[in-house]
Amino acid sequence: MFSRLFHRRATSMEKYLVIVVIAYIALVGIKNPLFFSLETVFDTVRSGSTMILFGLGLLVVLICGGIDVSFTAIAAAGGYLAVKILLASGIDNILLACAIAGLSGCLMGLVNAVLVHKYKLHALIVTLGTQSVFYGGMALVLGTKSYSAAEMPKSMASFGSANIVSFAADDGSSYGLTVFFPIAVVIGVLTWFILYRWRLGREIFAVGSDADAASRIGINVGLVRGFVYGYAGLLAGITGVIYFSNLRFVNPTGLVGSELFVLAAVVIGGATLTGGEGTILGTILGVTVVQLFQNTLVFLGLSASFNNFFFGTVLLVTLATMYLRKRRANRENLVFGNA
């Protein structure tokens, strides 16, 4: 069934994560049957939507052999710029907000690409620097004033509370499947199409595997890097609007600091820091693991402190598994050296 759906076999990391997710859900469900409810599922989907969008953009960058830790600053700056323009112009439209944030995010991503490719700087150092530049520039030019639900653009507040389907809870409140879910699905399908059904996708994998070899066979490495960083910036900018809308509170300082959780989730999903590897399904499973640990510990009667413990344990086991798998593959291919 998996092969028919994805036209490939599941990777060992995807199988491992499916086991982790099923085992954890079973453990929480046995401990607290209230966990098995639509409300819990919908809450997990809502809180995980922004991480999925961040993760898909970062996945493309990692496959191309780069890394980006500036995407939260891009999301904060792009989303906050959109809020400021909507309030100043009086044009209260969610599509305009997404267009402004996405375009500005794409431009900031292209800045990363130029610095990485033209000046041959390490991507981690570049994006650490631009993270501060983008965030600091936003604070200097736009400020960091927060806006409540009553003060923010009404289209964003309405967008954040909109559901595809809604149900009434026992206490009289309502819950439902957020509109962020189909957006995440569309972005996931688009990313899949780019990576597996477009020539550019094969070039992204080729550059990530060996940039010099890719250049020798005629691939424009600079153009490919420009696309992946621009695409990651585009998704980050749109995610900034979704993040503010979901909170129904505009606080540009709230996003920065969560980038390492996203990076770890994508790596748990099977993407490597050396490039050329990674899958969309693995990224979704990695984000699912993180979200389960962050949102469901209360059902086990554990404090939030256990989140870091469980998350760190899964991350270490995952990295050890990846190392051993790579080492075994090198032995089978008679490749000797550091695994």
Image (cartoon, rainbow, N blue to C red):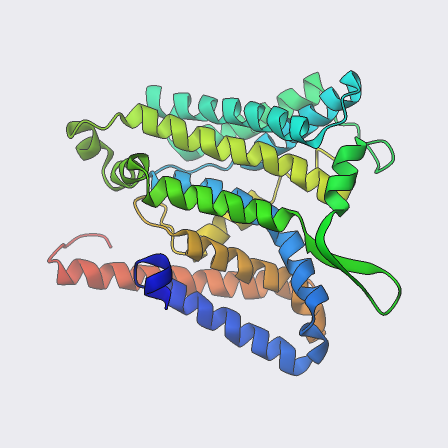
Residue found at x 67% / y 60%: 42
Q: Residue at x 72, y 65 (%)?
A: 39
Residue 55, horizontal then vertical, whole percent: 50, 46
Residue 182 percent location from the top left of the image = 59, 49
Residue 56 vertical placement versus 106 (above, below): below
Whether residue 214 sits left or right of residue 134 in the image: it is left
- Residue occupying image coordinates x 33% and y 29%: 224
The quadrant holding residue 210 is: top left
Would residue 18 appear left or right of 180 to someone viewing this image? Answer: left
Q: Position of residue 204 (x, y in %)?
A: 31, 37
Residue that appears at 66% across and 35% down: 241
Q: Is residue 1 above or below residue 49?
A: below
Q: Residue furthest left?
A: 334
Q: Nearer the viewer, residue 332 or 37?
A: 37
- Depth check: 157 or 28 in front? 157
Q: Tell me the quadrant of the picture where the C terminus can be found.
A: bottom left
Please state, as top left, top right, bottom left or bottom right, where the N terminus lies in the image: bottom left
Residue 263 appears left or right of 171: left
* Residue 120 is at least partly visible in this image: no
Residue 188 visible within the image: yes
Q: How many marks?
A: 0
Q: Does residue 152 lie above or below 334 as drawn?
A: above
Q: Position of residue 94 (x, y in %)?
A: 70, 32
Q: Is residue 30 left or right of residue 277?
A: right
Q: Nearer the viewer, residue 218 or 263?
A: 218
Quarter-of-image position of residue 122: top left
